[in-house]
Image: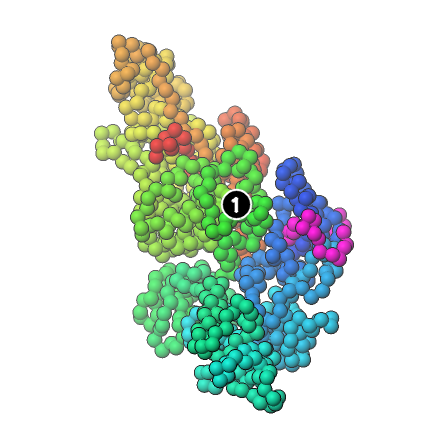
Amino acid sequence: MHSSCQPSQGERNIYYILTENQPYGSKLFPAGSMCYLKEQTYLRHISMASTRFWRFVMEDDGSVVTMDVESLQPLSDKVVGFLLAITNVQERLNCFLERHVLDAALNARLGQQVLVELDCETFLGTICYIGKLHRSPLPSGHSPVYFGVELKGNGVGKGHCDGTYNRKEYFRCKQNCGLFVPLNKLQFLQVPENGKEEEKLDEVVVMPVKVGDTIGFYSDDAFTRGIAMDVYKEGSTWLVKVCPEEEGSADDFRIIPMDSVVKEELLSPGFELETDIGSFQEQLKRKRSQSTEEKEKKSPSLGVNSMVQINLEKGNSVTGTIRWIGCLPKMQHKMAGIELDEEKGVSDGEFEGVRYFLCPPKRGLFVKLESCQPDMRFQSKTQTSWEPTDLEKYSGGLDAAGELSNSPPLRDDMAVNVLHGRMRGIQGHCNSCYMDAALFSLFSCTSVLDSMLYKPALPQDGHVQKILRDKIVNPLRQNGFVAARSVMDLRHQLTEKGECSSFATSEKDPEEFLNLIMHHILGIEPLLKLQSGKLKEQECYCYQIFIDKQEDLVVPNVQQLVEHSFLSSDLKLVEIPSCFIIQMPRFGKEYKMFSKIIPSLELDITDLLLDSPRECFVCGDVATQECSACFKDKKFADTGLKQYCDSCCSQAHSHYQRKGHQTTKLHIPEEFRRDGHHGSLRVPREKLELFAVLCIETSHYVSFVKYGPEKENWMFFDSMADRHGDENGYNIPTVTLCPEVAKYLEMPVATLAMEQPRDMEGVAKRLFCDAYMYMYQSKKMALYK
């Protein structure tokens, strides 16, 4: 266990990091500690799926600890060495969570400029080495990865070495100008995108040679090798002072333009030397051009809609989104107009009487573009550091193209395996819960609205559909996690399309979001077609229940509420909907008309359909007449609209209290009229299936999703269930199983009415007491729409 040798391929270790403090007996392993288990053990666990509690070896002391694997985050092989070099566990955790720091280290290259933190000061330096320094003293035998840096400018003489460590030379520099440091001591500088900082660009991109390098150059049409003795700049031209190897005197130096020399590593068989000087220089330029292109590909750029953070005075920082980039009067630097996430700005997008962009008051701020840094919470281009796909080889991560293939919804055990746990679902950020809950409900475990993802979209709206499909729905179904960055991209697009400047920052209602994206942007066919009396047919995407307070409905179910609402508004469904989204009766977000509502797992819409056959509720024959007054008669059953065949209608209305009822004749389809015998065919029942419920409590939306056929098959999703860090931290979305819901679904209504919400088990209280929107589907109709 304490071998100092690197494990062989067959004994490869799978690494994890603790994101929470882990007590174990008398010990406490703090968040940021690392642990591992053997690859064979890992594969055995995931193949058996027998328990979540695995035995891990702690990296710091080799002790064996049993922990819940769902409380850990996996690490890819390429990041393990970088994190092991950071001995402070809190700083290690911060680097893991702030993905942009780790990404910068992974993409770092020799010759790149960095800022080095040394004795509370910061100095400029150049990376000269990246790798291991010695055999590992750690139990796993895995070696930490360090950066060898040569200090420049004011840092000269303040280092600790000349590039040598333990008598082994890793790079060469002047004495006391070299350092070996972990990634958390560095700030990785990016190459400027514009040409304004030409000097820095030259140093990083164009100047590939430093003192002591072996180089080649042409002299009198002959190719000559030499040693670079000095590198300096005259005007805009970089020059190299060279001592040729074949010259007689060591003092015989040549001054060669930088463009005319080539570094030793390029003097290889792959670099074809030609007799023509121009061809030589062209080759050199191609090499440098390729290097520059690679650098540009790796360097993230900031543009309009980029999410950024700006450091203010006294160590304070703010976050926001770039809405405008350009030049302002009397300003020499390129400026950025920022819409802040909070009211910490000074304008609404206007500067000195001229409007450059639009945002809510006190949300606008104009700063130098160079002062903006990518928001550390959203820096993963393919996945976030907390996303549970680091072990792509085993867990089916992103494909080689960086985009996920189209995936079906998750059901039954697959839904549990992919979605259940912390850092699962859709990550919330900046009042996004209304959208997170709606998207999770509509796409995680059902395909009823997948037409939104694949229907042909207009060119101007294709980007919205692509974000929804490729950045949200497919990652959710394959990886079980969607980072906040993806939802923010969608919110920015909706801000532009919806002509509403607050869509990316303010809380909205789910129906506002659904109407915007379904109708105004993607233009899908309305989900509901309704007929009110003889008025014109109405179309909508969500149905709001409106009813008067019913004293006899103490704890109603959804079936009762829908029937009461349709009857009071004289409504009928023109056709069976593929998706029926129903908003519960409320006055604003706070006031609920009913303290509890029972979810109807099936919604029978047979009697709500226009011109469809209906069944006499007394004898079961084909109904010919409907009576709305009988529906309210307490002597009849509490649920179900009241329709009769002719004989039952006469008998029911022979009572003196019902003689004044006005009945309505029903349309009878031709196939139910044959031979004048209505009972020859049985009336089919049309039922919709409940697949999700959105709930709201104190302005925060969560959702319940039915992931399987059993009554216990419910999961609860909260995009902001927990949080790491303060205002610069991030939300931790969580999906939990809630089989306790079944207990209350089977409970008698009278018993459920007496149940105190605070005494209800688990999260069941939120489903029964905080329901905001119910979502039903017809799998039969979904095949055609």
Mark 1 element type:
helix
* Magenta residue check for 184: no
Which residue is at the front of the view, 626 or 686? 686
Q: Quadrant of the C terminus?
A: top left
Which residue is at the front of the view, 344 or 448? 448
In this rendering, the answer to whether 246 lies above or below 108 is below
Which residue is at the front of the view, 4 or 567? 4
In this rendering, the answer to whether 207 lies above or below 298 is below
Q: Magenta segment, which residues?
A: 1-28
- Dot 1 amino acid type: Asn
Q: Position of residue 492 (x, y in %)?
A: 39, 55
Does residue 309 show up?
Answer: no
Residue at the image position 62 percent from the left and 66 percent from the top: 130
Does residue 528 show up?
Answer: yes
Residue at the image position 57 percent from the left and 71 percent from the top: 265
Residue at the image position 36 percent from the left and 57 percent from the top: 501
Q: Position of residue 212 (x, y in %)?
A: 61, 79
Q: How is the image coloured?
A: rainbow
Q: Position of residue 381 (x, y in %)?
A: 49, 56
* Magenta residue check for 19: yes
Q: Residues within 10 Å of mark 1 (few under 14, many from 20)?
A: many
Q: Position of residue 403 (x, y in %)?
A: 46, 49
Q: How many marks are shown on the rendered structure?
A: 1
Q: Determine whether, in the image, residue 88 is placed left or right of residue 336.
A: right
In this rendering, the answer to whether 157 lies above or below 301 is below
Q: Determine whether, in the image, residue 395 is placed left or right of residue 557.
A: right
Residue position marked by numbered label 1 in the rendering? 479
Residue at the image position 25 percent from the left and 29 percent from the top: 533
Which residue is at the front of the view, 1 or 10? 10
